[in-house]
Amino acid sequence: MNDNLPLRADASEMAEFDLSEATKLRDVVFRCTKQRVKWISKALHTIRSRSLQRISLELPRRDQAPTGDAIWEAVHQEWVDLDHLLVQFWTSRSLRPTVMYEPGELEEEMRVYVATLLPELTRRGAIDLVRYPPWSKVECTEL
């Protein structure tokens, strides 16, 4: 296995996984195909690698947001918890998360969307907002 390739994880592939054995893990990309992100927080809590250099999130489309106040409240709390955890990674390890979004989305609308999902990171200016797919020409923008 090539240790230089990023680890890509999708919620549809596995509900939980332990990354503590990935001692040479450098890049991890979480694909958020659904609004629920508790599984990402659980996975991040297991990371022991001191080689970790990048955490990236591929955001779900904005039109896939859950409907109903009770559902949104549960989903929103998962994002707030993830936000707090990513702030910890940023402050303790200087890891600035990358948030990727589809090219068809408008950048300004994505800034607002990301600020809703990850308010503390956004307030601190600690996110790189990037269009994906990663194999296309990508431009980074600080929030």
Image (cartoon, rainbow, N blue to C red):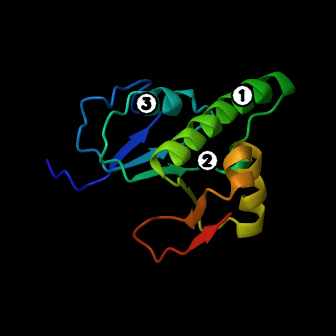
- How far apart marks 3 and 2 lie (CA) works out to 18 Å
Q: Mark 2 points at which residue?
A: 60
The amino acid beneath tag 1 is Gln
Q: Name the residue under label 1.
A: 77
Give the residue displayed 52% in from the left and 55% down from the top.
Answer: 96
Of marks 2 and 1, which one's residue comes earlier in the chain?
Answer: 2
Judged from this view, the residue extending furthest toward the front is 92
Instruction: Give amino acid for label 3.
Output: Ala
Real-space Cα separation, disc 2 to disc 1, in angstroms: 16 Å
126, 62: nearer the viewer: 126
Q: Where is residue 44 in the image (x, y as percent from the top left)?
A: 45, 33
Q: Which mark is residue 43?
A: 3
Location of residue 51 with respect to 17 vertically, above or below: below
Mark 3 closeness class: few <14, some 14–19, many ≥20 residues within 10 Å: some
Label 2: how many Cα within 10 Å (few below 14, some 14–19, many 20+): some
Going 60% across and 68% down the picture, which residue do you hit? 103
Q: How far apart are marks 3 and 1 (CA)?
A: 17 Å
- Answer left or right for 69 relative to 77: right
Residue 67 locus on image (x, y percent): 80, 33
Q: Where is residue 7 in the image (x, y as percent from the top left)?
A: 33, 46
Give the mark, 3 or 2, whose residue is nearer the N terminus.
3
Tell me what residue is drawn at x 82 percent, y 22 percent.
Answer: 70
Residue 117 seen in the current view: yes
- Left or right: residue 17 versus residue 61 is left
Q: What element carries label 1?
A: helix
Residue 93: x %, y % from top left: 45, 47
Looking at marks 3 and 1 on the same chain, the residue that comes earlier in the sequence is marked by 3
Query: Of discs 2 and 1, which sits in the foreground?
Result: 1
